[in-house]
Image: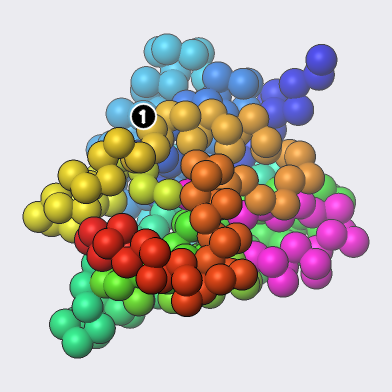
Amino acid sequence: MQNKLYNRKIIVTGASSGIGERLCWHIAKKGGIPIMLARSSDKLAQLKEQLKNELGAQSYIHIVDLQKQDEIAPVIDHILMEHKQVHGLINNAGIGVFDYIKDMKWDEVLQMFQLNVFACMKISQLLIPHFSNHREGHIVNIISQAAKISTPKSAVYGASKHAMLGFTNAMRQEVIKENIYVTAVNLGPVRTNFFSVADPKGNYEKNVGKYILDPDKVAFVVVANLLKNKREINMPYWMEIGSIFYRIFPGLTEKLFKRQFNKK
């Protein structure tokens, strides 16, 4: 069976840790070439060396702070000048802060929307003409089940993920005629350093410990579906069933699962 990823170049944001790091590893393992974006030059350099030593893989690193809108276009322009063709984009970088609306801090609201929404929108917009010119490309947005199920203390985070899911679904319809695939990846809680910011006290991670996803498993599934026309990846699947039930019976779901929804 032909390996679709062999020698294909895939941009990964938030590549220095967590899901992003594992995405790059699995891309490289399948013969792909990860183009890794993050703020931490040290972590990216270590990952580049690791991929070379463990897998004999080629990779590229680009230092960028996606929370600064004016840094995005220059780094994407540089990548497109450096590489004849880029084949895919995984918008993985994201941040969350769990707080009641009455307690939310406006700088954190802006930070979440810049990283979770605006950066993803901008990078996608910049790459669509490139993919269109080559008549192929794949945009994968790592979103969240929070885009489908609203819960207390995640109003802003959930709103940012609702925005990205809506953007992703509209983009898919716009670019399919250009032979560009668009995939939404909706995840439950994943064991990464995300919770060090979202939930510094560790209560939520402790409460959902038995349900938490392994970032390596998530990355394996996402990479297995790269360059394929896949609408959505939902993990864990039982949570997707719950989100469907929530859309059909929202009031009943909020009543039945009130305790679970308030675990943050």
Q: Disc 1 residue type?
A: Leu
Q: Is residue 85 visible?
A: no
The x and y percentages for residue 196 are 18, 51
Q: Is residue 29 visible?
A: yes
Instruction: Assign the N terminus to one quadrant of the image.
Output: top right
Instruction: Provide the residue span drawn in magenta.
Output: 168-187
State the residue at coordinates (37%, 62%). 257
Q: Nearer the viewer, residue 53 or 202?
A: 202
Disc 1: CA contacts within 10 A as few (<14), some (14-19) or many (>=20): many
Reading the image, the residue beneath label 1 is 47
Q: Nearer the viewer, residue 217 or 34?
A: 217
Which residue is situated farthest in the left direction here? Answer: 201
Q: How many marks?
A: 1
Q: Quadrant of residue 50?
A: top left
State the residue at coordinates (74%, 57%). 130
State the residue at coordinates (81%, 48%). 136
Q: Nearer the viewer, residue 92 or 237?
A: 237
Look at the image and name its color scheme: rainbow
State the residue at coordinates (39%, 37%). 213
The x and y percentages for residue 126 are 64, 65
Instruction: Assign the C terminus to one quadrant of the image.
Output: bottom left
The x and y percentages for residue 203 are 15, 53
The x and y percentages for residue 102 are 19, 87
Residue 182 counted in the magenta span? yes
Looking at the image, residue 14 sits to the left or right of residue 168; the answer is left
Which residue is situated farthest in the right direction here? Answer: 177
153 versus 217 height, above or below = below
Helix, strand or loop for disc 1: helix
Looking at the image, residue 230 sits to the left or right of residue 155; the answer is right
Residue 12 counted in the magenta span? no
